[in-house]
Amino acid sequence: MSSARPGFRWDAINESPDTVDDDFSACCVQSTSSACPIDAFYENTGEVLKLGLPQNLASSPTLGRLLTLGLVTGAEAYFRSIFLGMLRICPLARERAADQMIPLGALEYYGADKIGMGIFEGISFAGGLEVKKRSGTLLNFSWPATGSLGVALSNFDAVCHIRHASVHSQGMLSRGNARALRVPPTAAASQVVIDFPHLQKIALICTSLVRAYNSDLFKVTVDKWISEKILTGSWADDRKSFTELCALFVSRVDAVGPRAANYRYKALAPKIGKRISRPKA
Amino acid sequence: MGMVEEPLLASVFEERAEYLSKTELSEWTAVTNADRATLSKLKGPGAKLLIGPRGSGKSTLLKQAYFELQDEGKSLAVYVNYSKSLALEPLFHKTANALQLFRQWVLLKIALGAAESLKECQKEIPDDLAEMTTAADEFIKRLEAGAVINFPEHYTTPTELLHALETWTAESGLKRCVLLLDDAAHAFSSEQQREFFEIFRELRSRGIAPKAAVYPGITSYSANFHVGHEAELVECWYRPDDEDYLQVMREIVSRRIPETLLARLKGREELIDYLALASFGLPRGFLVMLSQLLGVEEDESHRPTRPLADKAIADHASSVRQIFFSLAEKLPRYKRFVELGGELEQGSIRQLQHFNAGRASRSKATVIAYPEPVDSKLARMISMLEYAGIIRDAHTISHGAKGVYHRYTLHYALLVEGNALGLGRNFSVGDIISALSTRDAHALSRVSPVALLGKDYADRCTLDLLPCQNCGSPRFSEDAQFCMKCGRQLRSASVYEELIKSPIDKLPLTPNKLHGLLNHTAIRTVNDILMDEDNMQIRQVPHIGPVWSDRIRRYAQEFVSV
């Protein structure tokens, strides 16, 4: 009896796959945060950073990259929330967004109150370009590149390149990432490894951006509400909208300035009064 | 002999070169051979770093180079003083583009300096320079006043300024542009320091030669700036052990002091040598002590005496130490390093006192030697002491099997005040002069810093990091920007804003002047002095005239500057 030659073993490349179901419904819990966008950002940042102890980061090159993702996500969430908030409370933003297209299913999923979220489906705010574009189209908000916000956004862009490399290629920098990070081209590919000081710096960059954006957008919005006479000069009439505006922007965590909206309104009264007495251009 | 007739006393004892006129500078400054060599390097091609502690004469040399270049008419000399850079430090806590604002401030001050220089040489100012400087002046003033402002219409980069300077130089028919950048150390803001030296590196070309005045010890450079390669180090510090040192200092006196005051020193010339040696090669200290010896604005009738000279030296020693201890305010994280540095200095004085006791005059040592290795904490303490001029690097020496030692000369005023020369109780001025000027240059005392500071000094030498202002948790490390317990950002106070709130006893004032200010004025803080227009309040104090009032203002300005 001749022995047959064994056939090619196609299963001898790696271990076989397992059967797994794709039910993650237990992981999807109701969001409970009621903080304003900037305070929600602070909360996320704090929680992420607590996981980034120096010894943990030193022993795991992956951890720093993952935590970077966590920090940038927090900044992205801030932008989504602030845009949504503005669409909800600012008539000027609503007017600009009136012609935006959204998927039909967004109405059922988000509800009428948060229908604006449909505009941002599939959009990433992990990059200065999209932040600038949406700020312009939806809010008519722009800024000079060399101003505080311009520089903060530029720094955030650099961080987003680190995040991009972390998410898509285990920290390996693409040519575009390397150029943006001013890493000189070398024969060996460069990989991002985030240690404690750099993770802290990334958090600082994200924080500076959110703060600069938050305070500048608030100022620009108030100025527009005054010039467009959305603020009438009567606290009784302006109370609801101005209180909503302060609730959206004013940080309770930072606690700088008066907490009550009417104190802030009083400080604006002379400016509002001056505008009201001028005929609209 | 003084060539200027009856100058104002305030100018005579004006220690800072940038406040002297061209005539005064030229006629009152004694120029040594070493100075000539330094001036040649400052006026010539290539990037240079002029290094020396406070009062060593850096500004004098830069200003002299400036005036000589103008007289020679071949180069465009641009003098810029950056002493107000710390006033911009609060911006780093208020806005994300502080670095960009600082960069513009550095560059536009150079443009303004170029326009000023062309004006002084009666040359035409190019249109683009005139346009640049129109907005620059207001921008600079507002920035130095702490305002967060927008950029001028056109954002200038170092490369653009470099090309512009080359063009302006050529259009003016000149060969080269020499940038003389004074008070450029930016020692108390690491962000400013890094940015400045990046700009300095970029402002070099065949036609542009930048020179910057920096301090020893605490000046650190940007990652891309390699001292020695990017710029040559040129030392600016008279050597009190040089043969012609006393002659040079006597010449400063004869050139500067009017006849009426010089007459008081007749027959007491050795007191001039005494103070000259005590000044440790630093002309500013010499002038301060001299004015005290001559009783300027104190008692016009008294004669200079040995006790007065001793008092002037003791006060000067105290003032030098004050400059060192002020580092605890300017670099609050290094407060404990400053404390230990003070102990190191005191311990070194005692060590020398012990070493010198009973030794012949020629064998007295003024040099202390610490063995290698010098750890990073000790190195930082030493660098701070160098900045203040308390010690001077006397270079490393190998003692064969005994090992390698780092040598440092201690400030002579501290040695005299601490009686570290071991001259006994009743020594004459001549004894001290002899001990300091005719000793063996190789005499030194070897001592381990552990012997002076204790075995636990490394444990005591920790960074003073403020705890979290929210939850009170200690800061995790120097690199922490956020609290690892509550997640809130860790806030650091602005160094500048803390400095201007400091009480006036932080300034190197004599006790009399301090009490005078406290008893006769409402001045309590450094900011009060800076805000005192025309020194009106300060002048109300008895025995404070133009010399002392200007000096007090300058102490306040220096306290809040680099």
Image (cartoon, grey):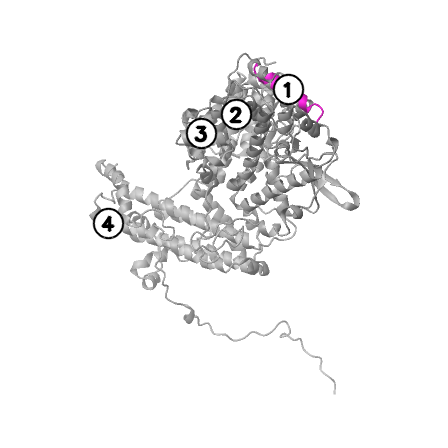
Does the rendering let one see residue B91? Answer: yes
Question: Relative to residue A22, is residue B324 drawn left or right?
Answer: right
Q: Amino acid at mark 2?
A: Gly
Screen quadrant of the N terminus of chain A: bottom right
Q: Which residue is mark 1?
A: B269
Disc nearest the viewer among 1 and 4: 1
Q: Which secondary structure, mark 3? A: helix
Question: Relative to residue B12, is residue A126 drawn left or right?
Answer: left
Of the image marks 1 and 2, the number of the one nearer the N terminus: 2
Q: Which chain's residue wears label 1?
A: B
Does the rendering let one see residue B241? Answer: no
- Packing grade of label 3 (10 A; few <14, some 14-19, many >=20) is some
Residue B53 image point, x, y percent: 60, 33
Q: Residue at x 57, y 28 (%)?
A: B312
Disc nearest the viewer among 4 and 3: 3
Residue B346 vs residue B538, the one in the foreground = B346
Q: Which residue is mark 3?
A: B516
Cα–Cα span, label 1 and label 2: 42 Å
Instruction: Please tell me whether the stretch drawn in magenta is mainly helix, strand or loop.
Output: helix
Magenta residues span B242-258
Q: Which chain's residue wears label 4?
A: A
Screen quadrant of the C terminus of chain A: top left
Quadrant housing residue B272: top right
- Packing grade of label 1 (10 A; few <14, some 14-19, many >=20) is few
Q: Amino acid at mark 4?
A: Arg
Q: Which residue is mark 4?
A: A239
Q: Report the disc number at residue B113.
A: 2
Cα–Cα span, label 4 and label 2: 54 Å
